[in-house]
Image (tube, rainbow, N blue to C red):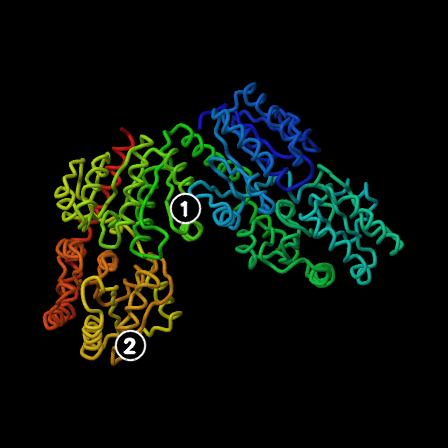
Amino acid sequence: MAEKQTILMTLMGLEIGGAETHVVELSKELKKQGYNIIVASNGGVYEKELLESGITHYNVPMHQRNVFKMIKSYYLLKDIIIKEKVDIVHAHARIPGFICGLLHKKMNNFTFVTSTHGVYSTKMGLRYLTNWGQKVIAVSEDIKEYLMKCYKVKSKDIFITINGIDTDKFSPKTSGAKVRRELGLSDDEPVVVHVSRLDEGGSATAAEVLIDSAYKLSKEISNIKIVIAGGGNLFKSLKSKADEVNRVMGRKCIIMLGPRTDINEILMAGDVFVGVSRAALEAMAAEKVVILAGYAGYMGIFNDKKLVDARDNNFCCRGFEETRVEPLVKDILYFFKKMPEEEKRELGAYGREVIFEYYSVSRMAKDCIEAYEAGLKDSASTHYNVIMSGYYGFNNSGDEAILLSMHKNIERMGDNINITVLSNRPEETKAKYGVDVVYRFSFKEVFNAIKNCDVVLSGGGSLLQDSTSTRSLMYYLSIILLAKLLRKKVMLYANGIGPVSKNFNRQIVKTVVNKADLITLREGYSYEELKSMGVSAKSFVTADPVFTLDGISKDEAYKLFEKANIPTDKEIVGVSVRNVKHWRNEDEFVEEMAYLCDTIYEKYNRNIVFIVMQVPNDIRISEKVHEKMKNPSYILRDSYSPYEIMGIIGCMSFIVSMRLHTLIFAARQRVPLVGFVYDPKIKYYLDKLQMPSGGDINDFDMDKTLEIIDDMIVNHEKYAEILDKSAKELEEAAHNNEKYLMELLKK
């Protein structure tokens, strides 16, 4: 990033608090590195520190959810952005983020980045007051997960940083003598220090529990003192409570300091620190023993065994038991009465080492600069909005695999492409895969999505066919037609075409598909089918996108077998069957498949596992074959993700399948396969993969199929080598879909 770029930091206020200190330290470090830093907030005790560092501060009332103050803040910030020629706005907290988000949408002349220092409530519409900007900086991994889960922020747009600590300011070399004199504390009086902003639903919890602990602590240590620093909306009530405790005890045990800026000296005036987050890190930098206790939970005395968990939750104790009097008193008493001096020194030194390794201010600034650079690159790029229309959200693993493959491959084309998926179960699709979705049967949602897009992708999969129903065919054609009416580009993406049997349907397909700007087809049969219908639009044969998808590891897959109570003591043969009523007598088919499976079990000592590609449809036919068998077999009944099914198949000896994507999963995992043909697409890919066919589903040859399986078991490596070569070629062909899409986007 070029020097002297202007960065505007916006936050609610500058009173005592972890987020506030974070912004001050970040601003000072960025200023040192040559950036022009401006801060806007409601002001507070840290204004002076900013001004002393040469950083301009504007007073903007972003500290309340008050409509009039928010409107005032909007116009004040707008004037600041124009006057100071701001390049980047970095918002901290919900209200500043919301206001800056409105300005970004309106002005669109600056890069917008946000930071989240904790988790926010989504109740009573507060979700809609939240804008995470182009890029968001999270202070821990668990907050990143929270952003992805609760707000569906994309992983690529989230940057992890730390609460950078000034290790010169917070150091064991700093003296606490001045503060001890101010508070009338003798050198030998035991002192517990707590620092936080005392707001409702925040670290005030630890302060309150400390106050409640005073009686029990005083019984064991008669001259103990508790020093609490920080202001906030609970300060008055907590001070009243502390005063009452002091009155009952007949001495000033608890000292409420209110907001202070000399936190480094206050920490050094104490013996042990109780608290969380940034204040805990500052105490560690000062080589103080730290007891982690806060609103989100209680972790106790910090040591090397707690580092991983503490880093994961940003030293906030999220996910741990609540802070209570009993464990807190126990840990404080252990520190003063039982902990050896050597252990105190070791814990203090270890805490400072942790700060140097993980929490330096320069590291924090570096993380933020990476987010700024990504945001600037994002702002400078041409953005494209792409719609994916397919058979998504119907619990069909093959089509879900297409969705994931397409989405992953298009995302890799660049950060400037936004993808929206039309799904039958939008919430489920979004929750499972973290993609942007709209409900495919909401005309308003679909209309608005297409209206705001650059390209509609129809596919992949066999969407344009009438063997299932004419209604589904008309749905996909209507999406294409709507896109063209709205003057949008349309690409049929890795489509399988047909069969389209009815003459009327063939005419409509010809009329609508000829309006497409570009067509890629997953097999040659589809190309011939389109030409036979009179489609003359530009068309290319590529391959199914699923040839680019990866599966879970074998270790993870074996855990799924264990969970499903499927034994893995023998080699496993995977069998994938589907409804055959359209093509032949089901009872005859079930009997033949049961005989085939029994023969594999008895002759080759393999366990049979039925792979369910569409829940619940495939379960019914799998159960019928399973019940007809003389020997035991197993059914994968759960709704597994495509990644999981592919990983499961990777643990199998070979596959016997009717389903196209079961065959593709096997090819992707280099697991030999035998296919049964019910559709030309199956024959096409068996030929491309150079894998054997068990014959047509209407009349397959049992003896021939068993001969093939014999040969496959004897020459397993040969089949795997053939698959390796042919699958690589198809993977390369599948990636041509993205190349054609990029050409279309740039036209």
Q: Residue 443: x percent and y percent?
A: 40, 41
Residue 366 in view here:
yes
Callout 2: SS = helix
How far across and how far down the image is residue 524, in percent? 14, 47
- Asked where in the image residue 127 lies, by quadrant, the reply is top right
Q: Nearer the viewer, residue 649 or 474?
A: 474
The earlier-in-sequence mark between 1 and 2 is: 1
73 vs 544: above or below: above
Figure quadrant of residue 723? bottom left
- Judging by the rendered image, the residue that carries numbered circle 2 is 627
Tell me the amino acid under the disc marked 2: Glu
**Which residue lies at the image location 31% right of the left edge and 47% below the top edge?**
390
**In front of the other: 335 or 389:** 389
Mark 1 to mark 2: distance in Å? 38 Å
Horizontal placement of 505 versus 78: left or right? left
Do the residues under discs 1 and 2 have CB atoms within 8 angstroms?
no
Q: In the rendered view, tell whether residue 453 sits above or below residue 619.
A: above
Give how far across and how far down residue 492 sits, in percent: 25, 41
Identify residue for label 1: 439
Which of the pair 246/540 is nearer the observer?
A: 540
- What amino acid is at disc 1? Tyr
